[in-house]
Amino acid sequence: MDERLVDLREQQLDLLERVYDALLRVHFPVPGELDDLETMRAGLQSEVDGLNPELHVLVLLQGSELAGCTCYEYYPRGNHCLISYVCVSERFRRMGIAKRMLVQVQLQLSQRAQQPLAAIFAETHAFDVQDGIMNPLERQEVLASLGFRCLEFDYTQPPLSERHEPCGGLKLLVKDKDSLPSAAVVSYLDDFAGSVFGWEEEPWKTEPWYLRQLASLSETVLARQERPW
């Protein structure tokens, strides 16, 4: 079967609604966890400005079927990446699709970034959060097999938009690293929040969910391989 990997930022944007309904909405049903469709569409069409994140949606097609997708954002200000969503259609699991998509992500980032990346981040549910789609412990094993480790601090996802609330019950992961300086974690939090609220007044810096995270950071934030997270 013919296999193709396309980046919706560069081609076939018309696939987005199908990908959103058939893959993303199915695999990320928790309220506040998934970006709105129109927010994603606008992100894919936004111009590169050297400050705001650049959204990419990689879609792996097997013939005409949607096998999987990976959404990631490159943050040029902090020179890091967030893997926002990775999902593989049930029919195509255990075929190495997630790993192939992440290899392509790293290839694209190596071409885009002007220096080695500070970090590749991802998020996952804490082990005791059930979404009815995939056992969180099984999901953690998959992410660990892809090289991710869990950063040891009290993480809360910044709001996805001004209409969303901060999202708890998540863990922040980092790929292929044993630790990160706290400054790298703060840079990620600020870049994420700044892309939502704007950069001038930095209103998130007085929010309880932000201050609680800063208080839980040590100077060097360890990344734990042992599960559960």
Image (spheres, rainbow, N blue to C red):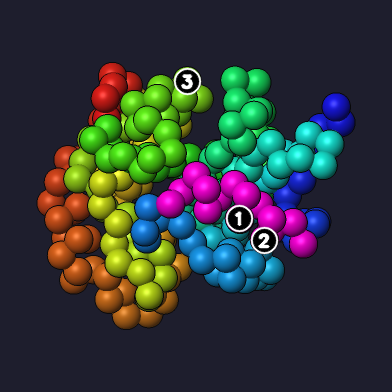
Label 1 sits on residue: 21
Query: In 3D space, how far apart are the residues under numbered discs 3 and 2 (Cα atoms)?
Result: 30 Å
Residue shown at 21% from the left, 41% from the top: 153
Q: Residue at x 80, y 57 (%)?
A: 12
**Residue 48 among magenta residues:** no
Name the secondary structure under disc 1.
helix
The residue where tag 3 is placed is: 145
Q: In the rendered image, is residue 23 in sight?
A: yes
Residue type (three-letter) at the residue carrying disc 3 = Ser
Magenta residues span 14-29
Cβ atoms at labels 3 and 2 below 8 Å apart: no
User: What residue is rendered at 27% in x and 40% in y?
Assistant: 129
In the rendering, at what x and y percent does residue 188 appear? 38, 53
Question: Mark 1: which amino acid?
Answer: Asp
In which image quadrant can residue 134 be found?
top left
Residue at far bottom of view: 201
